[in-house]
Image: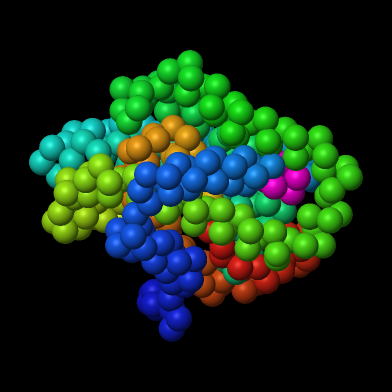
Amino acid sequence: MTRLRWPSRMPVDPYIVLLLGTVGLAALLPAHGTGADVASGASTAAIAFLFFLYGARLSTREAMDGLRHWRLHLTVLACTFLVFPVLGLAARGLVPMVLTQPLYQGLLFLTLVPSTIQSSIAFTSIARGNVPAAICAGSFSSLVGILVTPLLAAVLLGGSGDGFSADSLVKIVLQLLVPFLAGQVLRRWIGGFVARHKKVLGLVDRGSILLVVYTAFSEGMTRGIWHQVSPARLGALLGVEAVLLAVMLGLTWYGGRMLGFPREDRIAIQFAGSKKSLASGLPMASVLFGAHASLAVLPLMLFHQMQLMVCAVIAKRRARDPEAAGEPAGPAAASRATVGTGSR
């Protein structure tokens, strides 16, 4: 029996270190008064800009080309927006013995956000899976999530945070959907510029997310909500998230086998269907939760790093499978490229 080896270099995402540093800065130097108003306005503009870039980057042509894998995409979407939320609702039984109500709300929100793009592609490539399918699955999930995540939050989290009202819906449309659609419309003219400067723009959108995190955690500090979280509760949250990730990794792999998908497709399903996007989830939480966003995004930040570490182990194990070693070159193999794990 082949032993599962821990990789020599764990993928501790440097961006997570920056996020934690931003949280620490907000704890030591939270924004107050006029500074808080300025940070809030800048955060609102940053969120709109983020989703504008998402729209400008998403190739409609590539998305349409991927429709021929509709069974795979439906499977990933079902895992992301159906199975995950059901497991999140089941975790309600852990309140209050294991999780506090605010941490549970953050955990439930985690189950509602879209899948990742870059990291799903990266791990699918390492494991010798269907990379084009992973690209399309991540893109579809992000696109669907702009509409589905807020609607699911309205149904399942309507009584949390600042409440979900008509005003919240207007904010979501103006801050998320309108900029995204504007990016799609203008992609014909700015798509080339975005592609040529993707590294610089990548730094811009990551910096925007850091601003969103600083604003949310500053407001949490001024309201004193961090007194609600103890080290024991954080440990319990990590344990619950480890179980959640293990269940989804198992369901996506063995469920894909039961549905008759070939190995390359099962790899794409596993990595796209078991992960959640930090880049999409953080701005959405800021819009949906307002002053309560800091606790709402904590489970997502922890889950993001956990999924990177665990999926790195699985991807390397899949690459060493005898089935992978004897795999003939095909479309998926031909399109593999080295990509970073990123935060999306």
Q: Residue 314, percent across and down?
A: 46, 66
With respect to residue 159, does 301 lie above or below? below
From the viewer's side, name the closer residue of 31 and 244.
31
Q: Residue furthest left?
A: 97
Scheme of colours in the image: rainbow
From the viewer's side, name the closer residue of 122 and 112.
112
Q: Quadrant of the C terminus?
A: bottom right
From the viewer's side, name the closer residue of 174 and 296.
174
Q: Does residue 60 appear in this view?
A: yes
Q: Residue furthest front?
A: 34
* Quadrant hosting residue 154: top left
Q: Residue 37, percent across and down?
A: 45, 42
Q: Residue at x 40, y 35 (%)?
A: 290
Left or right: 232 in relation to 340: left
Q: Residue at x 25, y 42 (%)?
A: 223
How many numbered discs sit on the rendered protein?
Answer: 0
Left or right: 12 in relation to 221: right
With respect to residue 201, does 299 lie above or below? above
* Magenta highlight: main SS: helix
Q: Quadrant of the N terminus?
A: bottom left
With respect to residue 109, does 261 lie above or below? below
Per the rendered image, the range of residues in magenta is 53-58
Q: Residue 339, percent across and down?
A: 65, 68
Q: Does residue 254 appear in this view?
A: no
From the viewer's side, name the closer residue of 294 and 81.
294
Q: Residue furthest bottom?
A: 8
Q: Residue furthest right?
A: 189
Magenta stretch: includes residue 56: yes
Q: Residue at x 38, y 51 (%)?
A: 31
Q: Residue at x 56, y 53 (%)?
A: 208
Left or right: 6 in relation to 338: left
* Quadrant hosting residue 87: top left
